[in-house]
Image (cartoon, rainbow, N blue to C red):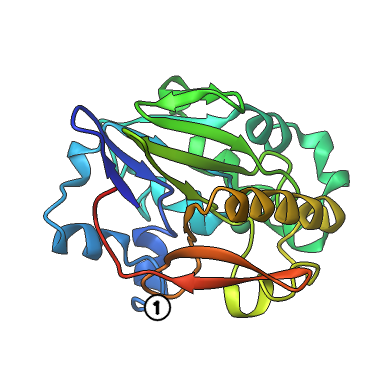
Amino acid sequence: MVINTGSKLILLDTGFGPGAFAATKGAVGQLGNNMAGAGIDPKSIDIVLLSHFHIDHAGGLRTADGGLVFPNAEIKVPAPEWAFWMDESNISRTNTYNKGHFPNPKKYFAGIESKVTRYEWGKEVAPGITSIATPGHTPGHTSFAIASGSARILAQCDVTNIPSLFLTHPDWQLMYDNDPQLAFATRRKFFDMAVAEKATVVGFHFPFPSVGHVEKAGSDYRLVPMPWNPSI
Ligand SMILES: [Zn+2]
């Protein structure tokens, strides 16, 4: 998602990136094409705001040969996510999937540490955008509230994945959740908040239009899709 605040152009997560696009013949890594289709030049991105360090969210910082996809952007990352993945001793605290993933963040950030700003939870991290603690999927996994005037949407990143499976069964776990019990508790807390405030929710992995309202369905939840709209 690219957010135009009027003064800043902010990219929320990068997708897999151009290397994966080439390697998979376009099965993943379509962000570059989609930005071109939308008339957005990667050089015009002021801030890359990362939710967490999984490769489908942060791998697109780099080209296949190590170049910068967003050369003029400040990169903002969750402080707890940085602390976890940059400390080698934490590999003992990963599950099987995340153990395999452990070397990747060091590769994205190698040599560009000076472009990286670490942000805390519960703070305004860019104009109108507030970070929300949603750990469990990864230790520093973060969601965002994006506000304009009295309107507000919640970007849930990887709090959950495919809504028809995982909103309706919020206690089901994917192998990507590093701490399944914490992810489960976070998911219920986040969606109880979304239901209470009748929030518009955006999901990174939701099918198009990837935006809707969350309703309670018995003790679980369901997504009620909304028409896609580029403004809030
Ligand atoms: Zn993830």
Q: Position of residue 3 (x, y in %)?
A: 29, 43
Q: Mark 1 falls on what kind of element? A: loop
Q: Is residue 162 in sight in this rendering?
A: no
- The picture quadrant where one finds residue 72 is top left
Residue ranking furthest to the left:
39
- Tell me which residue sits at (35%, 52%) in the image: 1
Q: Residues within 10 Å of mark 1 (few under 14, many from 20)?
A: few
- Tell me which residue sits at (62%, 27%) in the image: 79
Q: Position of residue 162 (x, y in %)?
A: 58, 74
Q: Position of residue 208 (x, y in %)?
A: 38, 74
Ligand 1 visible in quadrant: bottom right
Q: Is residue 137 above or below residue 116?
A: below
Return the residue nearer the eye: 108 or 194: 194
Disc 1 within 8 angstroms of ligand 1 (CB) = no
- Tell me which residue sits at (83%, 35%) in the image: 89
Q: Is residue 72 above or below residue 222?
A: above
Return the residue nearer the eye: 204 or 219: 219
| 44 to the left or right of 141 | left
Q: Is residue 204 in sight in this rendering?
A: yes
- The picture quadrant where one finds residue 230 is bottom left
- The picture quadrant where one finds residue 74 is top left
Circle 1 residue: 27
Return the residue nearer the eye: 33 or 38: 38
| 146 to the left or right of 161 | left
Q: Position of residue 202 (x, y in %)?
A: 45, 58
Which amino acid type is shown beneath numbered disc 1? Answer: Ala
- Tell me which residue sits at (65%, 55%) in the image: 191
